[in-house]
Amino acid sequence: MRKLVYTYDESDPEDVKLLGGKGAGLVLMYKQGLPVPPGITITTEACKLFYSNGERLPDGLMDEVREAMRWLEERTGRKFGDPRNPLLVSVRSGAPVSMPGMMDTVLNLGLNDDTLRGLIELTGNERFAYDAYRRFLQMFGSIVLGIDKKVFDDIFEEIKRERGAKYDSELSADDLKEVVRRFKEVLGDKFPQDPWKQLELAIMAVFRSWNSPRAVFYRKANNITPDVADGTAVNIVAMVFGNMGFDSGTGVLFTRDPATGENVLYGEFLPNAQGEDVVAGIRTPKSIEELKNERPDLYKQIYDMAKKLERVKKEVQDIEFTIERGKVFLLQTRNAKMTPLARVKTVVDMYEEGLVTKEEALARVKPEHIIGLLYPRLDESYLKKHGISPIAEGLNASPGAATGRVVFDADTAVEWRNRGERVILVREETRPDDVHGFYASEGILTSRGGMTSHASVVARAIGKPAVVGVEKIKIDYDKREFRVDGITVREGDVITIDGFTGKVYLGEIPTAKAELPREFFEILRMADEVRSLGVRANADTPEDAEIARRFGAEGIGLLRTERMFRRPERLSIFQQVIMARDSEERREAMNKLVPFLRNDFLEIFRVMEGLKVTVRLFDPPLHEFLPSSDELLEKLCEARMRGDSDEVSKLESLLRRVRELREANPMMGHRGVRVGVTYPEIYEAQVRAIVEAYLQLRKEGKDLQVQIMIPQVADYREIKYVKEKAIEPVFKEYGVRMPVGTMIEVVRACITADKIAKEADFFSFGTNDLTQGVFTFSRDDVENKFMHDYLEKGILDFDVFQSLDTEGVGELMRIAVEKGRAANPNLEIGICGEHGGDPKSIEFCHRIKLDYVSASAFRVPVARLAAAHAALREGSGVPNLLIFYNQASPLRNLIVSSCFGFRAISCVNPNSISSPM
Amino acid sequence: MRKLVYTYDESDPEDVKLLGGKGAGLVLMYKQGLPVPPGITITTEACKLFYSNGERLPDGLMDEVREAMRWLEERTGRKFGDPRNPLLVSVRSGAPVSMPGMMDTVLNLGLNDDTLRGLIELTGNERFAYDAYRRFLQMFGSIVLGIDKKVFDDIFEEIKRERGAKYDSELSADDLKEVVRRFKEVLGDKFPQDPWKQLELAIMAVFRSWNSPRAVFYRKANNITPDVADGTAVNIVAMVFGNMGFDSGTGVLFTRDPATGENVLYGEFLPNAQGEDVVAGIRTPKSIEELKNERPDLYKQIYDMAKKLERVKKEVQDIEFTIERGKVFLLQTRNAKMTPLARVKTVVDMYEEGLVTKEEALARVKPEHIIGLLYPRLDESYLKKHGISPIAEGLNASPGAATGRVVFDADTAVEWRNRGERVILVREETRPDDVHGFYASEGILTSRGGMTSHASVVARAIGKPAVVGVEKIKIDYDKREFRVDGITVREGDVITIDGFTGKVYLGEIPTAKAELPREFFEILRMADEVRSLGVRANADTPEDAEIARRFGAEGIGLLRTERMFRRPERLSIFQQVIMARDSEERREAMNKLVPFLRNDFLEIFRVMEGLKVTVRLFDPPLHEFLPSSDELLEKLCEARMRGDSDEVSKLESLLRRVRELREANPMMGHRGVRVGVTYPEIYEAQVRAIVEAYLQLRKEGKDLQVQIMIPQVADYREIKYVKEKAIEPVFKEYGVRMPVGTMIEVVRACITADKIAKEADFFSFGTNDLTQGVFTFSRDDVENKFMHDYLEKGILDFDVFQSLDTEGVGELMRIAVEKGRAANPNLEIGICGEHGGDPKSIEFCHRIKLDYVSASAFRVPVARLAAAHAALREGSGVPNLLIFYNQASPLRNLIVSSCFGFRAISCVNPNSISSPM
């Protein structure tokens, strides 16, 4: 039979799965010669057997325990159950992944009426001994025997009341004797005086706590599956006491500051106390700094131990220690939870200190750390201090916190902004026409829409905080106000939104401004050394381009041209293009736009000097540039009521045209290259503007590489036709050549990629649209209507618009890459859908050997890191060990998102589930 | 060097490609011992050389011709150019495929001033000889020398005027001499007296006519590509003369009646005339029947020859003959063009007569013949006789002709129909709510929409004629009229529409009612013996089901359930379902519908007793069952103007809900199984109704197999969820089991077909939706907005919603079949999209080994035939010889469609391009 109980000497500290995290940590410290109280570990295997055995301990387990306890006795010089020299132990759970507070611990086990006397003799401290006994009875009663903890608390409080004591410490030894008496009354004969029986029952209780409802829920929520952790170990460790006087105490420390990452010990220490007392918060602990002044000798000991552990574990450690009568004991060590800032700083520092390799450093920084650094955060302590609650809650669509005055439309946002106000744009939902308002606002709040609604996508792309889908908010545009739960918020009132949590607050909440530390840029530089995948940015404006460049984008992978047509002075010209009845008229109108477009391109080209810029030709359906029929009908009604017959007939004729252009499913309608084929004049004018801008830049003595990209291609002949009719004639006219490529965003383009590759210099996967085509899901509709349901019911594991569906969409990408490269070995292949900024998706892109990913400017740093991770993972050949990107369960996604304000991030390292993922 | 000139003796009549159709026909007749004037053939190879040689005759060709002419001289006993005994020849084009009237012919070649005298001596008929000479000069001048034909006609008419002659025959020999004189003046010295020079020039002229603009256009229009026919042959045949007195004559005959198929000779005969005289239409020809009475001996000869040719060619023949002084000569034979009725009847007759095998018979019947029989046709002769022109023209969306009174809405259609009127439903476009009007109408006319608009699809499905997209028609619903080119047509006025041609006529035009002959059913029975692919029908009503059964469907492959919710008394209940705010409310409302649905199912089940019926669960987006926002806004405006505030607030609240449900792209939105997952109550109630109907049928002592089909599946877990929540509980409750399967209409379902097949008992490809997903084309929008452009510009070869895109959609189907069958060998796989009724698509389905196709009821006969063709083609191993389904060019499609009123049919047998495809 397999060995189920291990002493430190018999254990391998690497075997976390068998020994649990706590057990392995103790063994590690022991083997490093650090002072840990001796202990033994019952393995997770035993726990599994316990369950397969109908919740009975495996045969022979207690014999093994007795045997191992002898080792413990030898090391402590005490004897378990010996009335004269009693060994007391703690019985603690310890799963392979930390599940803090989820399972149970019993301290001071081994005490009974006899050993109590021994303890008194040994310590010479009756009060201490009775205190220990009552603690033990209380824990044993509640944890092992399942008696409501409240029963014990009530008794204890009653006695304090009787004695007129305010603090526990005011109770005398006699008082505690009384407590013990009454506790024993409660326990009756269920409390075994036999320490071995106590131990057996406690072990079973710890095993059972593995399957307690809260523990089960926690594992489900955190997607801790049996392959990651299946059962808890039990650690039986000799007790040490921090409450044996003022040369004793207990504390916790971090080997570096977990908030700032500064390389100083950080922690707290409570003299003459046991661990629970720290938690109880009755006395204010001292900082570790104070210990340094008071007991430099102890501080030095602890400092050395901590640093030693850090060196061995190569991560910042979170350590529990106890000082018993001047002697330091380490009780636990684990990797520290840190703020994103601290995570990035410590990793870079440790790399520079030579503690970790570049690869190790990179592996420790998660995308969410990078994101966490990019955006301002609310000052949580301020909220707590002032007891401030949110007035509403929605989806955390784009991270960051923002404060400003409420405005209800984009124009007002711009107007107020121009007079120096900070504003929050509040809308039911947003449209492309609102985008100028996004730039003018600190943040966006909508009452409708999901994580990939227009508001969400645009806000993320330009790095503005956004909270969307706050359904409780009822907006009244006419009254310029919104109501929520009886509160009325008027235009101009100040609110604060938290894009990390989806919460909305009244008034201004201070935020910690995001200032990017040196280490942020340093870790990305390291990432660049490792990654093979290129990283470009999706950017439509000079502002976007500047952000992209600052964040290290190697070019623009997607320059959308639609907004160039939306600016007021251009829209009316473009409407002429749409209304034109023949090619002549259309060309004429388009040519009027060329100077505007040329200037737009030139501004962006200047920013991107020396890099690559891929310009996507016109993509959306034309009707988006006309007023909606709803709008017209409302106006028509007004005009009729006024009796304004001129206006009526004008509106009626416009309405007719709008209805003519109206499409049942515009996403799949007359758009992209389809418009390019039917109205080549539009593409031709765009190409003309691009070429002229490029030549102008050259005149200015600068250069860059421009690529022209055709959207929505389903058949190679579309490219051929458009090249022939709209692109090549312009090249010829100006005597230039530019690579011409295509979006791969239509399913058929993937399937016929071989033919398309012969007509294209490059491919760029448009996985937003591709996902729509593969699932027949309209992104706008799906997010609003049923994505939530699909995640909740487990039909989808994650939102496929946030992270690539590698099984469906990915398979088509794989086919396209294979066929495309076979037909055209020089083909450059990238991705410019939103997935290009999603770490899991980036890993997939690396795996299928794309040349680059293109992400929105604010996701470029994440993409650089994720690309490095992908390269490392590949190099290591251990895909799931270093970092484990998890197609997390929906529930998990919700939790992750509430932690990090970004649902797209569903990656988690199982080794650090206890760390601030 | 390859031989370029062949005598009959040297030729193989099978080598149509080398000899051309006419040449091969002559050789065949010769080899069968039939009396043909001797001749030689210059091959199509020579024509190719002519062109590759810069339009010069190949070296040595004329030497070969001289050599071969000797054979001709021997056989005729005359000598080419011999003034005493001159041989005259015709020089005629003859391509491998017939291009009637497209290329040139020269008769009486070999005449000159010398041989003219010989001809006079030989015939003793000066007038005849001069007539022959002037005809020759005229043809040589216009065809060989390129002089405008009008010049000759003018001279001829002038002389007739001078002589006071009304008919050509009134001109004397001297008059004709004068004609010859003046003609020669025109020709001048360009006319060679040397017969060999004449021959050389004529050969070149015939070769050149291959590339005349009209011939090039014809080939392009008919998709006659070089692999089918590349150059024309030239036939040089000894002249025989039908104009040598009243024991001479000329005629054409069909070996069977090409209109009815009756097994009698059918044709016309003109005594004392040359072929051109028949065409000129000056004298009324006699019918072949008259010849039988007048010259039973000649009739008998001709009859025997004709029947012999029919036996040899195994097809009804179209024969040209000439009788020269009592001796019959056959000049040409080719396969006859026939009406669909005649085609089907003759094929079955010939099979029953033992002339052709079953396989040969089946191969000769094309899908369009079957379609042609199913629908009434306009009486063309009536139109011609009365000089009636259409008032407008649109797309021929659904075949057949129909006459009725104009009505402008479906309810009026039903009302008028109920009082005994025949009506034509005229709408701008139609919606599902109009379908009851389709059933009530003789035909449908719309001013908008394409070949796959709602009107088109429904009309075809239920076999009603439809003309759609007649843009010139301006409908004024308020005035109950439409206008077109100044004509106003009021409700109640009679119009006739021709769904074969897309034409619209004022008043009643007589139609030939479609009565299905015995042979129609017989040929389909023969098809059934050959095909391996099953054929089922898409049918939603008992009426559909009856048609389907009558046309031989083996079951219902797609029973759509949506219309069950649309009937007035149900719609309001279903609106409660949609408005319901929780599951309880929803279930309650749905349960009220169960009795209605049960009854609907029962009625259909009764019709389909003994067969399979596949019921598709609810598919469309829910908002389709609420009024449109446009409608509500109009009403709202009216209510506001009335000041009816109650109504205003009611409408406003409805509008809110409609807007809530509104989707940007409903086709890709909350529909199909997505609704089933979010609102399982809907599916549950449907399954309940199905099961109850089935049990009721069993009670009635009948049985059938019901299959339940889930639409829009993208992931296997959708099926799993719906089975678990909505289907299996009902099965359990009633103690029944039915196969549960899925539509495969989402791209992802194809890619993950292995997983899906483990959850499904059957697959049914929904290629309409699949095509949408693969192309990102919304069918409604694409057809209206740019499909036409795509076809015209050659970006698509055919409308992919009419015929399967085998390269894209087909590839995904292939993947799905492969993965599906591998995972579940018992999987039944069919197709129920509209492509299931398209012959080319059916062939593809056969090739990828589907179990069945399901087509709309009226396409079932076509599907049965096409399935047989597919099996034959496979068996023969000669895929393109027996029948050649052609991905025809757009232009060809237009022509085909105008011939057959059905654009979906783009199949053509290259051997019968001259037959009435």
Image (cartoon, coloured by chain):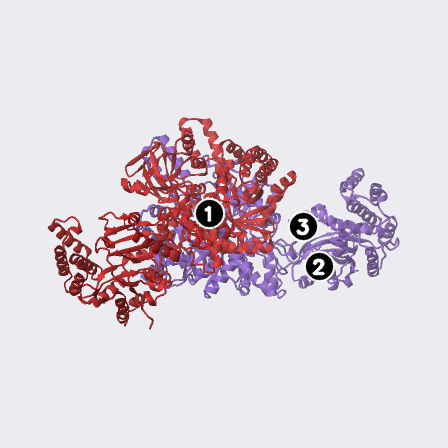
Chain colours: A red, B purple
Residue type, mark 1 in image? Glu
Q: Upstream in the sequence, badge 3 or badge 2?
A: 2
The chain to which mark 1 is attached is A
Disc 3 to disc 1: CB gap under 8 Å? no
Judge whether A652 appears above or below A902 on screen: above
Viewer can see residue B457: yes
Front position in the image: A622 or B786: A622
On the image, the x and y values in percent for residue B708 come to 40, 58
Q: How many labels does the image show?
A: 3
Front position in the image: A894 or B247: A894
Mark 2 lies on residue:
B16
Viewer can see residue A773: no
Q: State whether discs 1 and 2 lie on one chain.
A: no
Q: State whether discs 3 and 2 lie on one chain.
A: yes
The chain to which mark 2 is attached is B
Residue type, mark 2 in image? Val
Q: Residue B219: give its label.
A: 3
Outermost residue toward the front? A297
Q: How crowded is mark 2: few (under 14 residues within 10 Å), some or many (20 or more)?
A: many
On the image, the x and y values in percent for residue A364 come to 42, 53
Judge whether A737 appears above or below B595 on screen: above
Of badges 1 and 2, the one in the foreground is 1
Q: Quadrant of the N terminus of chain A?
A: bottom left
Q: Relative to residue B279, is residue A560 drawn left or right?
A: left
On the image, the x and y values in percent for residue A838 come to 45, 50
Label 3 and label 1: CA atoms lie apart by 70 Å
Label 1 and label 2: CA atoms lie apart by 79 Å
Front position in the image: A724 or B220: A724
Q: What element carries label 3?
A: helix
Mark 1 lies on residue:
A522
Of badges 3 and 1, the one in the foreground is 1
Look at 62% across and 53% down and name the residue there. B916
